[in-house]
């Protein structure tokens, strides 16, 4: 009997074709995030679920999927899935680690440069017809060469950003992590410091930690107050790691120079107050959005799902 799979949003053909060759596949037709009630309705009778990080796969959804054997997330993160509920039902959960490392580090790098040199702000100003020629003080920003980059969370993406920043701009690299990585320190010349030191000494602070109860609002008013006045805050990890209201207040008061964000606390909602600030670079969660990366993610998510349904151990099991 053919396996039945539900996909919560259309994914690249590399993954869809793999699944359609070996299973009966239903794809959510709307070009928007599926709601919880819709997901509960559509999951019934399905053997496999391929979901996005933004989909609410909670205990209610899992209970409705009486035939579910695998939840394959088209993402590295899986904080949207109730792992305890899945494990209690013997449902495998898989993800797509590693594949988006370079693409996400590239976006963090781009945010860092754009914020430092006021790229987006000056682009909008020119497009509005205000450019009348070169001027000595026009859109002055900050150099990155030789400055200090503080990495909070030195996993794959954090280390990739450190490599790019040190190689391109000869930046000094500080990092704070749950544990020291001596190999990273030797290879990159990175220096392990406590969080206070990193915030006080970094010209750029880039976040690369998972969202956990411990990292929720890790960057709050107290943390922002410890940062330098010329500092740039970059977040390509998870929105709730930053207290958004505290960040808005710090940017308004120019207690830090700028912020470059790809993720938001109540995504997809972005506060109007944040959008209105000129000293921000705001992206719509496109950290992994290269064609090559998204194709590979689709293939990995599909293979993980098929492996479980066909009785093989998946390459990337969470539980």
Image: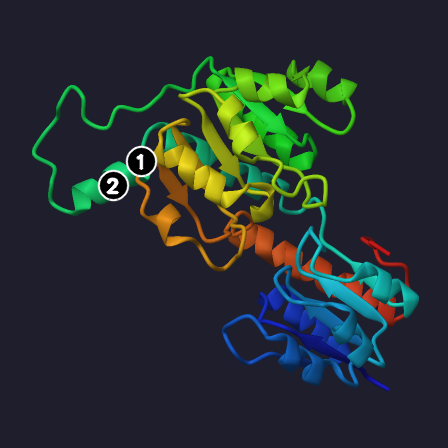
Residue 30 percent coordinates (x, y): 52, 78
- Image quadrant assignment for residue 22: bottom right
Q: Against 260, is 13 above or below? A: below
- Sort mark 2 into few (<14), some (14-19) or many (20+) by Cα contacts within 10 Å: few
Residue denoted by label 1: 119
Residue 80 percent coordinates (x, y): 69, 60
Q: Report whether residue 56 is seen.
A: yes
Q: Residue at x 62, y 20 (%)?
A: 196
Left or right: where 276 falls relative to 263: left
Q: Which residue is drawn at 77% across and 18% down?
A: 182
Q: Report whether residue 163 is seen.
A: no
| Badge 1 element | helix
Residue 33 percent coordinates (x, y): 55, 70
Residue 164 tag number: none
Which quadrant is the C terminus positioned in?
bottom right
Left or right: where 54 falls relative to 65: left
């Amino acid at each position: 009997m053919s396996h039945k799979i539900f996909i919560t949003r259309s994914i690249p053909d590399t993954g869809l074709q793999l699944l359609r060759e070996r299973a009966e596949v239903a794809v959510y037709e709307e070009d928007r995030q599926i709601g919880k009630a819709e997901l509960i309705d559509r999951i019934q009778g399905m053997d496999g679920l391929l979901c996005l990080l933004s989909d609410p796969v909670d205990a209610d959804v899992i209970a409705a999927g009486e035939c579910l054997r695998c939840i394959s997330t088209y993402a590295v993160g899986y904080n949207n899935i109730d792992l305890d509920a899945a494990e209690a039902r013997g449902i495998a959960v898989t993800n797509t680690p590693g594949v988006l490392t370079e693409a996400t580090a590239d976006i963090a790098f781009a945010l860092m440069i754009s914020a430092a040199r006021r790229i987006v702000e000056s682009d909008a100003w020119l497009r509005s017809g205000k450019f009348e020629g070169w001027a000595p003080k026009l859109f002055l920003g900050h150099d990155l060469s030789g400055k200090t980059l503080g990495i909070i969370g030195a996993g794959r993406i954090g280390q990739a950003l450190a490599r790019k920043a040190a190689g391109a701009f000869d930046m000094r690299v500080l990092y704070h992590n749950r544990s020291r990585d001596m190999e990273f320190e030797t290879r990159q010349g990175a220096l392990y410091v406590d969080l206070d030191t990193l915030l006080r000494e970094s010209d750029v602070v880039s976040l690369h930690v998972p969202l956990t109860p411990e990292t929720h609002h890790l960057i709050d008013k107290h943390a922002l107050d410890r940062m330098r006045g010329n500092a740039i805050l970059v977040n390509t990890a998870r929105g709730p790691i930053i207290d958004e209201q505290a960040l808005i207040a710090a940017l308004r008061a120019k207690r830090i120079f700028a912020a470059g964000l790809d993720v938001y606390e109540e995504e997809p909602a972005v506060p109007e107050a944040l959008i209105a600030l000129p000293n921000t670079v705001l992206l719509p969660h496109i950290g992994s959005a290269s064609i090559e990366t998204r194709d590979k993610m689709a293939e990995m998510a599909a293979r993980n799902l098929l492996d479980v349904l066909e009785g093989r151990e998946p390459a990337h099991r969470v539980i």
